[in-house]
Amino acid sequence: MRVHDAMTIEVQTISPATTVRDAARVMADQDIGALPVVEGKRIVGMLTDRDIAVRAAAVALGSDTPVSEIMTRDVQCCQSVEELDHALDEMGEQKVRRMPVLSKEGEMVGMLSLADIVCIDDDFRSIGRALRDICTPHGVHSQAARTRPDID
């Protein structure tokens, strides 16, 4: 099975200039916890509800702060033609529950989440393995070590 068999095609996105307030409103209105940040069709970052809480609210950044100041810039992506098992392994390794999907040309064409995979794949062992890896504390996307994206 390939990523394009499981991914969500209609994905809400925001621009780097979107304010934290407006991004939070989109998340609330759409009942979602993550928004890809794009310029044109190219992904430049990812913003999660946790980013808003940990990277903005916890350090008292204003709600008019552009999301470019708090988004995760190093976004792990997969390609639509990639094997689903490989994408699951990458999600586990990167400790992410969702991953933007790119075309061969590098344009964002969808989003792959664990929920998408659960809905179409009966092999719960591979999903369980990825979830175990994701839930193991610390890693490249851990926010425990920093509260601002510009602090190493």
Image (cartoon, rainbow, N blue to C red):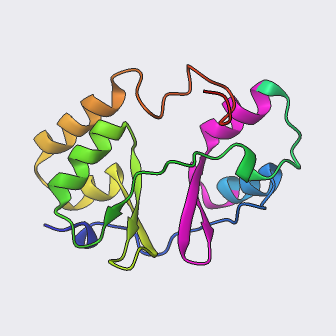
Q: Residue at x 85, y 35 (%)?
A: 61
Measured as percent of width and height from the top left, residue 58 is found at: 76, 25
Q: Residue at x 39, y 44 (%)?
A: 97
Foreground pick, 152 / 119: 152
* Image position of 78 with respect to 132: above or below: below
Q: In this view, does 128 lie to the left or right of 50?
A: left
Quadrant into which the C terminus falls: top right
So how many labels did they put on this image? 0
Is 123 covered by the magenta stretch?
no
Q: Residue at x 73, y 55 (%)?
A: 23
Q: In this view, does 64 lie to the left or right of 45?
A: right
Q: Residue at x 70, y 33 (%)?
A: 55
Quarter of the figure with residue 63? top right
On the question of residue 118 being in view, the answer is: yes
Measured as percent of width and height from the top left, residue 101 is found at: 38, 66
On the question of residue 32 being in view, the answer is: no
Measured as percent of width and height from the top left, residue 129 is found at: 18, 35
> What segment carries the magenta color?
29-58
Q: In this view, does 150 lie to the left or right of 35?
A: right
Quarter of the figure with residue 89? top left
* Image position of 141 with respect to 70: above or below: above
* Image position of 16 with respect to 118: above or below: below
Foreground pick, 31 / 52: 52
Measured as percent of width and height from the top left, residue 124 is found at: 14, 44
